[in-house]
Image (cartoon, rainbow, N blue to C red):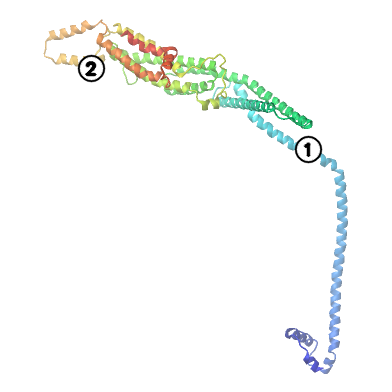
Amino acid sequence: MVQKVLSLRFEPSSSLAALQTLSSFYGEGNSVDQRRNLRYMIENENLKLSKEFVEDFSNVESSIEDMSKRIADLESLLDTASSQLQDSRDNTHEVLARARKLNLHKKHTTEKKEVLDLFSSRFILSPEDEARIRNSDTPIDDDFFRSLKQLHRVRLEARRMLDELNDSSGSSTAAEGGGVPSTPSSTSDGANSSHDELKGGSHYDAALAVDILHQTSDLQEIAYERIFVWIQRQCKELVSVASDHEAEEEVSIRIKKGLHVIRHRIVYFNHSAKEISRVRRQLLLQRFHETLVKGGPASRPIDIRAYDIVRYTNDMLAWIHEQVAAEREFFIQTFADDDEEAGGSGPAGTSDNTSGEKAMTWWEGLGIALSGVAEHLRHKVEVAVSGGYANLPRTASSLTADDSSFAANAKSSGKDGRSRTRSSSIWEDTIGHGPGPVELFKVSKLFSFFETTLQPLVLPSDATDDDVAAEVNSKRLRTVGDIFSTSSLC
């Protein structure tokens, strides 16, 4: 037995573990009884472990049975809930169907609202803007011009839509008559039906665009009429504030803004332009008279040298030259046909010029504005040429440089009183007579010089051709000819 045991091959680790487990069955010592009862002890230990396993497994079995019971209860509850849910689904089927229809209707309504909002923003003027234009009690200020700009934008959108519809209708008509080969009857019927639908929709859109233009045309005319009346009032205010340069500049800016708006309404524009030109004529004539009689802030009155026709004429023409430059700038800015500004605040490039009348140009307005000064200048030169100012007394403050030097030389000379009496008699002989040939020649040269200087200012820059210049001189700027025709008096 021992030999048999010894001949067995054991794994060192497993054999050691088995021997350690067997040693735990022994008590103290290694007796014969203990060795004889080794098998019995091992079986008892095996039985004990089996009992412990059975006891522990019974607890697991009870837990599993409890879990199985709970799962069965849960399945019962789920079946109950499922049956109740099915009952609820059956009962609320109509409600759910109606809810789906309502959601679909809500989606369509939202889309329609977005389309209507977009349409309103493009083709409908807001009530505030319409009331601001219609109500004559509202002032014509920046808000009014913004509302009018919105009105022009609405009309521009309507015209653009109408043009696009006309273009699409013309292209479809051309395609229909372009010799397309015949198709089967069913296809042809479907194509004709689609074409009729598109044609009907285009007709409806075109009618809508025409309605928008018709509805806004009355409002636009009200706005133009209000601006026309407003410009007349601004012209009157321009006369009242002529002495205040800053106030005059502010009123001029408002007039320019209003005139740009009615630029494409030829009747309103020409009437307003003529009124503005008449006001500028009145202001220029008033300033010319004040300069002749009172003088400027840093200059003496021009009339004080009326006895000297050359200097008198030169001073008047020099003042006119200065005013022509300023008035030219004013009329160019006021009458300019600015495309960008007309597109932003004008009537979308449209015009009511059905009679063929042309818009008044800046050089025509300048001619009207200079007409009063031209008449007054002609009168002054006629009086001077006829000797009407020769009897004016020469005061000490009005002597020219030559007169002052002559008087000084006379006083410093050692001559007697007879010489001074002779000089006085020579002076007295010249009083009451008109200017001599030399003075008249100098005046004529003055007119020739200023004619050459002023002509580029009073004529348009493109009037280089002889025919254009002749037309301008004959039809549009007769006043300029009147200014320089005064030289014929000399």
In the picture, the quarter occupied by the C terminus is: top left
Toward the viewer: 131 or 191?
191
Which quadrant would residue 429 be assigned to in this image?
Answer: top left
- Image quarter (top left, top right, bottom left or bottom right) of the N terminus: bottom right
**Disc number placed over residue 129 in the picture, else none:** none
- SS at mark 1 in the image: helix
CA neighbours of label 2 inside 10 A, class few (<14), some (14 to 19), many (20+): few
Tell me residue 51's x, y (percent). Answer: 86, 78
What's the residue at 70%, 33% (across, down)?
Answer: 113
What kind of element bears circle 2? Answer: helix
Q: Amino acid at mark 2?
A: Ala
Residue beneath the point at 27% across and 13% down: 442
Tell me the tag on residue 102.
1
Contact between marks 2 and 1 (CB within 8 A): the answer is no
Residue highlighted by disc 2: 401
Give the spatial CA distance, label 2 vs label 1: 102 Å
Compared with 172, 393 (above or below) is above
Q: Residue at x 86, y 51 (%)?
A: 82
Amino acid type of the residue that numbered disc 1 sits on in the rendered structure: Leu
